[in-house]
Amino acid sequence: MTNIPISHPRYKSLLIREKLVRGFDIGLVAKEGLLAQGRGEAFDYLVGEKTKVFSKNAIKAAAAMLVSAKSPVISVNGNVAALCPKEIVELSKTLGAKIEVNLFYASKTRKAKIVNVLRKNGADKVFGTKPSSSVILSSLDSARRIVDKDGIMSADVVLVPLEDGDRTIALRKSGKKVITFDLNPLSRTSQTANITIVDNIVRALPLLTKECVRAKKKHKKELLEKLQLYDNKKNLSICIEEIQQNLLRRLKLA
Ligand code: PTJ
């Protein structure tokens, strides 16, 4: 692993990049996953590489939705497995949620490695590996259409971090609620999910778990009221406006 000096102004961002590169080297991450990380980094730069108020609002709404869910499922891909396997397992244990591995660039070997890393980090069971449990999610042509009948197919709420737009739409069409982490507020996933957390998953996932611990102590009625007040489109507009303001400030400084 490259030695990144702690004094580097973008030390944290470079560490995240290194995690991805290592994930690629050990076979967790698809080549295309490195490109996805680059896209994420660009947007992270634009939002200021911090958890903003709009991210915190989405995290609170996501916690309310996950804690109120009957059967929440967390979908894991290569990038997520490389960036935050321990944190994913922690969230699943906090919620009693299932974890399913679901890949866009399907590969049996990569799937097995991802399952392995999740198990090493404490996951008891990982769905999405048994061909006898596989079913097809309709309205979707990519490999992501193959889901587990006892995992994603049985879920009422699905957390799909770093996702491609097609599946979010297909999941919504099948009646499921979708929560995502996506640094790009303009992506189709961001625009079509019920709740979009525009933040780096590395920063925001531990915050979501903390918020779920808090939400579990609240009455369901209070959580549902909070959810009704949350407006994803409005929250995304606030995020886009903030990016615009950041850029305008730069223009004035130049
Ligand atoms: O492991 P696989 O085969 O399932 O493939 C996973 C990737 C991520 C390659 C696949 O889902 C893909 O191609 O995704 P996209 O369409 O590139 O979308 C990924 C989204 O995640 C983009 O909008 C990025 O901005 C965003 N993103 C990337 N890194 C992060 C992120 N969002 C939050 N935190 C990040 N660290």
Image: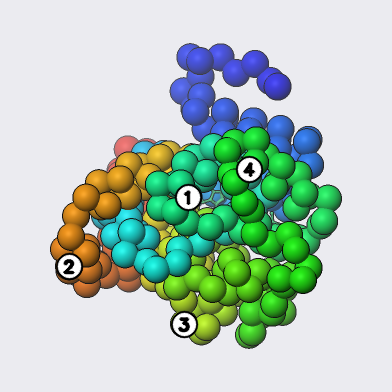
Vertical comparison of 108 with 187: above or below = above
Read off the residue under disc 4: 118
User: Of callouts 1 and 2, which one flags the residue occurring earlier in the amino acid sequence?
Assistant: 1
Q: Crowding at label 1, few (<14), some or many (≥20) Cα neighbours within 10 Å?
A: some
| Picture residue at 83% right of the left edge, 50% below the top | 109
Lower position in the chain sequence, tag 4 or tag 2:
4
What's the CA distance linking mark 2 and mark 3?
A: 22 Å
> Is 166 placed left or right of 51 in the picture?
right
- For disc 3, the marked residue is 175
In the picture of the structure, the residue carrying the numbered disc 2 is 221
Q: Residues within 10 Å of mark 3 (few under 14, many from 20)?
A: few
Q: Is mark 4 within 8 Å of ligand 1?
A: no
Cα separation between marks 3 and 1: 22 Å
Q: Of residues 28 and 215, which is closer to you in this image?
A: 215
Q: Quadrant of the C terminus?
A: top left
Res. 48 in view: no
Q: Amino acid at mark 4?
A: Leu
Whether residue 215 appears in this view of the structure is: yes
> What's under tag 3, amino acid-wise?
Gly
Q: Is 237 on the left-hand or right-hand side of 154?
A: left
